[in-house]
Image: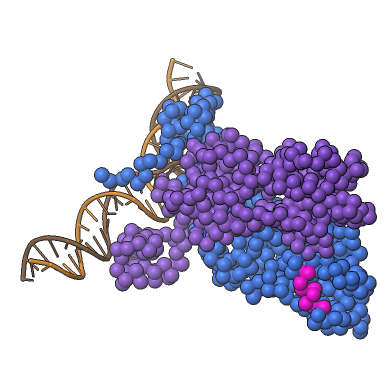
Chain colours: A blue, B purple, C orange, D brown
Amino acid sequence: MLHDIKKDNPSTSLEEVAKKAGVSKMTASRVLRNKTGVSEKTRKKVLKAVEEINYVPNRLAAAFGTGNTSTLVGIAVPTLSRDLFSQILEGIERRLQSVGYQPLIGTTNYSPGSENDWIRTVLSWKPCGVMLLGNDSSPETWQMLQRSNVSVVKVWDTHDIDDDSYSVGFDHYKIGYEMGSYLSNRYNGQFAYVGSRTEGHFLGKNRLRGYEQALLDTKSTEVKPLVTYYLNDRPSFYAGFYGTEQILSKHPDTRVIYYLDDNMAVGGMFYCKSKGIKIPGDIAIAGFGGLSVSSVLTTPLTTTKVPRLKIGQLAAATMLKLVTEQAAAKHCEVETELVKGMTA
Amino acid sequence: MLHDIKKDNPSTSLEEVAKKAGVSKMTASRVLRNKTGVSEKTRKKVLKAVEEINYVPNRLAAAFGTGNTSTLVGIAVPTLSRDLFSQILEGIERRLQSVGYQPLIGTTNYSPGSENDWIRTVLSWKPCGVMLLGNDSSPETWQMLQRSNVSVVKVWDTHDIDDDSYSVGFDHYKIGYEMGSYLSNRYNGQFAYVGSRTEGHFLGKNRLRGYEQALLDTKSTEVKPLVTYYLNDRPSFYAGFYGTEQILSKHPDTRVIYYLDDNMAVGGMFYCKSKGIKIPGDIAIAGFGGLSVSSVLTTPLTTTKVPRLKIGQLAAATMLKLVTEQAAAKHCEVETELVKGMTA
DNA sequence: TTAATAATAGTTATCGGTAACTTTTATTAG
DNA sequence: CTAATAAAAGTTACCGATAACTATTATTAA
């Protein structure tokens, strides 16, 4: 016999609800979507039927049937296990979930190739929008997104963003420059940067560039050209610890170290403490992010505080505006704060 | 005119691929799914057509059309911004993504109500499976999952798991008991626990219970009954800092503190340092998790190290086995390690 | 009371894939 | 060279919801 694609499907359908309630499928559909044109009596009947047979709507069918206008939102993120991103994600997720949108999260490992693959996959689920965290998407990724005409929001770095895309975050170059100026106004001698590189990708590139430029722009003649050290590893406390050891072995005269993020900076602080190096007397240290650890250190960390949850919420808000065809700001910048701690 | 549901749909379809290649839709479908019964010549033609019109398959349609056998996997997680979970998630995510499955992540905020709501939503996307992180799902949630006959894997605590569900993780009660025994063998006097409570939900309940039981079971008569302090806040460095201040103000004779997790323990360490309290001379401190911060502390933290990434990978592996109808172990326990640091 | 109008409810076609079946073409055996 | 068989390709129905239209019933106006 023909047509028995799935006979053991126990799931309920609108059809059954309608039958049970003695109305048409369409009427049941209207009730469930709170559409007008249904009498109170009918509405009650339908809701009762829904209750009775434990109806679970099929969003797959709904999204597909209406020309693929789903409530799925693709979110590409470098990694889930980095505070910087996970809290942005949390903000996005909460906001989307609260209005019934469903995030489809994919990790890219900071690799354009992986990002590309994932975007291709996620587009096949016909999301209404895609959010890109931690920038640096390849031209192919971008082209693919353009063709698919889903809404795209870039989240994190707003430096050098092309004007044809929406973005939420702040200018990392500026943050790096700001910290560079602050540090070069207070210290002289050898400046260093300890960062991290994964899969050939330099994390926080724009902050480093800003920092470097600030050192070049300084009036002080006693600031020596920047030295850098990159770990081939994820940013972590340990990476900061080890990276500090490395940079100091190569450049023992290092006077100031700027780190990729707070966790690495704290790792550096621990290294210095373990070696009896005074902070900031011998070495000044600055981080980035305003991560939670910095709030309880006995020596408060000098860093740039970033409102991560807020970035997430704003990004989600922008996305929601786009998919509901409301006007949204092209570029949304959040305030950051240079926290003058006791380490630099 | 009738039937113009979506005329401005620019997306490509198999139909177009087929037309372009001069074959039937079905043949094109077979090529794209690597099915047998297609000649090499035809396969090339189809792939060329796919390339030419930049075909993006519609997974929505595919999943829906085949009786809702999707490759979506729902994942309920208390929060994204806690190291403990985010690294498990990372493990799950990577594994699923690598075989073309798509995680649908939802946060529950440790609230059974939110979890319930989210499960209802996610089920409407007809996932092939659902993973529950951080246990404590309500009976309603469980019932809903049962009815939907998706595969379910519980991840995190395997203590007291009913035998009708799959689980991956370890026994938190046992971990608490183990730490309690270790500590009560080494210290006497006032034992304390500093934890956290969100939305009326006590985090890490089973570890506390195990810890408490170990103290009751100790041979020492000099161990005083446990005192506890809970913050109405997420676990964090700051929560540990503040919680320590609180417990010490109420119980100045506290000799040992066990914390909900390492971050809180480190917060506690910083508090003690800031007050000149010697660790472990005046107060002994133990954490849980083996979080990254503990690896760089000048005073290594006594804690229980948990292979989070591995838990995630195993959980994903279990799920993949279930949905492909292979045999999977009902309960999968990972090894944990009590790290004897210098804080207790 | 009847005609005009508004509010409800019902019908039909459709989205884009795929399972199951049928038909055509190629290959091998006798 | 034909018959039996295997491989390749094509047909059709269907999944479950909804947009757009039509039909019915209730309400109001004249």
Residue B307: percent from left, percent from top = 64, 57
Q: Residue at point 76% right, 41% down?
A: B218
Compared with residue A53, is residue B20 higher up or lower down, i.e. above or below? below
- Count of labels in the image: 0
Q: Which residues are magenta?
A: A240-248
Q: Nearer the viewer, residue A36 or B264?
A: B264
Dominant secondary structure, magenta: helix
Residue A95: percent from left, percent from top = 67, 48
Give the quadrant of the N terminus of chain A: top left
Q: Does B36 lie within the magenta span? A: no
Q: Residue at point 35% right, 71% down?
A: B44
Compared with residue B22, is residue B165 higher up or lower down, i.e. above or below? above
Give the quadrant of the C terminus of chain A: bottom right
Residue B239 seen anywhere in this rendered image of the structure = no
Q: Nearer the viewer, residue A85 or B89?
A: B89
Q: Does A241 lie within the magenta span? A: yes
Q: Residue at point 89% right, 71% down?
A: A276
Q: Nearer the viewer, residue C24 or A298?
A: A298
Q: Residue at point 59% right, 50% down?
A: B333
Q: Nearer the viewer, residue A188 or B158?
A: B158
Residue B98 seen anywhere in this rendered image of the structure = yes
Residue A192: percent from left, percent from top = 82, 77
Residue A39: percent from left, percent from top = 52, 27
In the rendered structure, the answer to whether residue B69 lies left or right of residue B315 reads left
In the rendered structure, the answer to whether residue A207 lies left or right of residue A53 reads right
In the rendered structure, the answer to whether residue B218 lies left or right of residue B30 reads right
In which quarter of the view is residue A167 placed? bottom right
